[in-house]
Image (cartoon, rainbow, N blue to C red):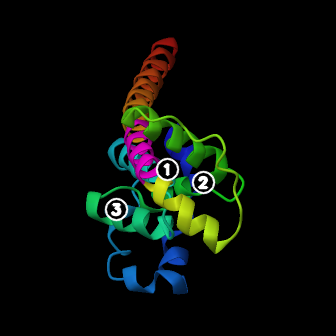
Amino acid sequence: MPKKLLQRFIPNPEKVRNMKGLGFLSQWLHKPYLWHLNRVPVSRAFWIGLFWMSIPIPSQMVTAAISAIIFRANLPLSVALVWISNPFTMPPIFYFNYLVGTWILGQTAEESLGFDMSWDWILNTLGELWLPLYLGSVVVGLVLGLISYIAIQLFWRWHVIKSWRNRVKQKQQL
């Protein structure tokens, strides 16, 4: 069952409540709906986690945690899905988002943007990149979130129906 699979990877609620970095959220972390592994909170968690994963902002985990609290999604799963964008995966993810943004705006992607770790590059180039990057990131995040939400809803329903039919067959064989 998907629930049993997810429970292996989700941390204990007590452990998360006692984390020092999440002290400002402690008043909400005791809410049981943040820890449920049902179809709706898990689907919402995938939407939230994959949306914030695609947005290039610092503290993606905090925004995912706050969104999970607001939208009553599974908190640990929302935060964990943000980790898909890590220092190794960020360049291709954000470059893809930039390409999507340029396509939506009808611009051409600047292929000669050679990255240079300097303030001059950041100040001069980021002004040109921010609109297509963030527009593409929001669109990609919404599309990924929607697809994952629908896929989890359908997969969970299929799995429950399959389990129910297997139980009925086992009872009939007895």
Element type where label 2 sits in the image: loop
User: In terms of sequence position, does the residue under pointer 2 or pointer 3 come before the other?
Assistant: 3
Residue under numbered circle 3? 67
Q: Residue at x 43, y 30 (%)?
A: 151
Amino acid under disc 1: Ser
* Relative to 6, 149 lies left or right: left
Residue under numbered circle 2? 85
Residue under numbered circle 1? 54
Element type where label 3 sits in the image: helix
Query: In the image shown, does 95 or 107 lie closer to the viewer?
Result: 107
Badge 2 crowding class, 10 Å Cα cut-off, few under 14, some 14 to 19, many 20 or more, is many
Residue 33: in magenta span:
no
Amino acid under disc 3: Ser
Q: Residue at x 65, y 58 (%)?
A: 86
The disc label shown at residue 112, or none: none
- Magenta span: 131-144
Q: Position of residue 94 (x, y in %)?
A: 56, 48
User: In terms of sequence position, does the residue under pointer 2 or pointer 1 come before the other?
Assistant: 1
Query: In the image shown, does 59 or 169 lie closer to the viewer?
Result: 59
Residue 74 drawn above or below residue 106: below
